Image (cartoon, rainbow, N blue to C red):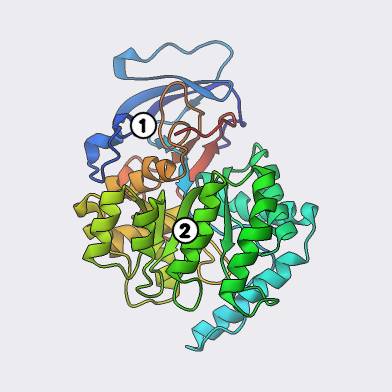
Amino acid sequence: MVGPSPGSSFAIVHATALTMAPRAARADGKATVGEDDLGILGDATIVVRDGIIADVVHGHASPAPQPGLDTYDVRGAVVMPGLVDAHTHALFAGDRVADFESLARAEKPRLGIAYTVAQTRELALPSLEVIGRRRLGPMRAHGTTTVEVKTGYALTADGEALLLEALAALDGAPDLPHVVATFCGAHALPPEFASYDAFVDELIARILPRVAATNIARFADAFCERGYFTPEQSHRFLAACAARGMQLRIHADELSASGGAKLAAALHCVSADHLNFIDADDIAALRESGTIAVLCPATAQYLELPRLAPARALIDAGVPVAFATDFNPGTCPCYSLQEVVHIARRRMRVSAPEAIAGVTTIAARSLDAFGVAGCIVPGRPADLILLETNDYREFGYYFGVNLVAWTASGKKAQHVA
């Protein structure tokens, strides 16, 4: 079935709709999610005008067909909010197939981030836009209508600014996901530096001012990990970004207990991501700080890490949990949030409502996009997906399967808290 064009006017009738409206109406942002939070409406009609949701009704209250609107009869299917991917590195050149071959032979990868940096530095703006479209298009086809994309594959002032300009251009494309840009300057040590401390000095003195001048990056992120940026170095970088008006995210405790989660809590980061090696004290600190946990289980699976993030413990402790792909060339070449939800359901013991909220409302809140993404509510952009199933629990049951028949994108809108 061919879906509506971006920003158009149409009506969806006879849908099983997961509106997420009860969850969206909760201002507390608490972690617990049950079936009642999904806002399930049977035999629902969703009216969209000029890309904005105008009405959502169900059952006997459904309006008669309205003239001037294309009508889509979707009985037997589920309509839900477009998916929100809250952690990706989707703008890069080249691939790391050689590293995948090394992993398949149980060997240590040899190329690493440095290879991707070298490849990405070669591209001018038009080529970056082409590459970005090639990455984001399949994500949209698999249901992602809002995506966070990090820089960090240039690691120079002009290069990082160029990546942000490409992301801004991609955000303007009506057939691609909405793009939320993050400056991930503290991602790796570029080849021209021998010291992480010296590179942090460079980030703060020269790269950050150039990036801030573009006024594109809404967030800043640091890879706080053993062998990369220490908590102290990450703190210096993130504090400088916060002083420039950026909100904070952090790669925390992905490969080891690195101290990232505690730093996220201390800085009141909007999100702490990965969290595979956190402990009970880290969970308590995140709960007290109000930081959202953005978990990336496909990365842990790809790398065969001995631990996955303790999603069940985080949710039970009251930490809101989102799920993301971490789509990148070296540690998670996966762009499907459906696959991620399958791993979360199967290996992290999260419920279907928890997983769905984790890729809609909670993920949107982590991107400060809660007012425009993650739910089906009148007045919001019509970012919708149609699933070829009549049982929402099949979202995450299948893997290696794309249940999304089509996506609909509403008008681009200013992200609001």
Tell me, yes or no, if residue 142 can be seen here. Answer: no
- Relative to the observer, which residue lies in front, 51 or 169? 169
Asked where in the image residue 390 lies, by quadrant, the reply is top left
The residue carrying mark 1 is 19
Instruction: Name the residue located 78 percent from the left edge and 53 percent from the top edge.
Output: 125
- Position of 236 relative to 356 (above/below): below
- Position of 180 relative to 99 (above/below): above
Measure how far apart labels 2 and 1 are at the Cα level.
23 Å
Amino acid, disc 2 = Thr
Q: What is the residue that sits farthest to the left in this orientation?
A: 316
- Looking at the picture, how far across and down is residue 306, in whole percent? 33, 78
Horizontally, is 219 left or right of 271 in the view? right
- Position of 3 relative to 119 (above/below): above
Q: Which is nearer the N-term, disc 2 or disc 1?
A: 1
The residue carrying mark 2 is 325
Mark 2 vs mark 1: in front: 2
Instruction: Assign a secondary structure to mark 1.
Output: loop
